[in-house]
Amino acid sequence: MRANHFRFIRSCCWLSAAAVLALALFSASPGAQAATLVLESASGGVYTYGFQLAAGEQLFFNTGDRITLTGLFGVTGASVGGPDLSGSLTTCGVTATSVCFGSPGLLDLDNISGATEDFGVLTIDSSSTTTGSVNYSLVGATPIAGEVGGPAAGSSSVPEPPTIPLFLGCTLLLGSLRKRR
């Protein structure tokens, strides 16, 4: 069973490496980069995000457009800040595992610079300080979706007991006690 587990992990590693290579080759094509949501900082359970736009790229929000982050853990609050987004996006829903930001009006983020830039600040507060992979999707005029770092459940710190050695040890102990009688 353990050998199958390692084969599975090895297969996942090869598939992940192939996906990263394909993404790198696709991203290297001119004009292939699209707007993305990026994790700008994560400290003490406060996660801040921005929209990253390539040079000359635009991101439009119409009235009612929403960006949702899912697969989160321990969310306690969310807010919108920064001169690019204040008043243009609002928090429209917060649960322990998801956050929704909505556009009450029109918003046009336009990168007129010659370099990639980040726009706005979306902040998520969480009881978790573990960063893991979460999903985001923007449903609206400029649909985008992907994965980004965010508050995730921590791993268990209690190790599994080694079952076979424990079983054999108990069997030997019981066998030796039985012979003494």
Image (cartoon, helix red, strand yellow):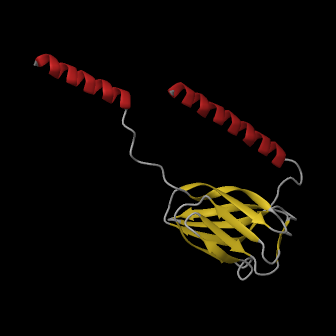
* Residue 103, percent from left and from top: 75, 77
At x 39%, y 39%, the residue is: 160
Q: Is residue 125 above or below residue 23?
A: below
At x 76%, y 40%, the residue is: 21
**Displayed quadrant of residue 151:** bottom right
73 lies left or right of 29: left
Q: Is any atom of residue 133 visible in this view?
A: yes
130 lies left or right of 178: right
Outermost residue toward the left?
181
Closer to us: 4 or 45: 4
* Residue 8, percent from left and from top: 60, 32
> Which quarter shows the C terminus?
top left
Q: Is any atom of residue 117 visible in this view?
A: no
Q: Is residue 149 above or below residue 102?
A: above
* Residue 60, percent from left and from top: 83, 71
Closer to us: 112 or 5: 5
* Residue 139, percent from left and from top: 78, 66
Closer to us: 62 or 119: 62
81 lies left or right of 162: right
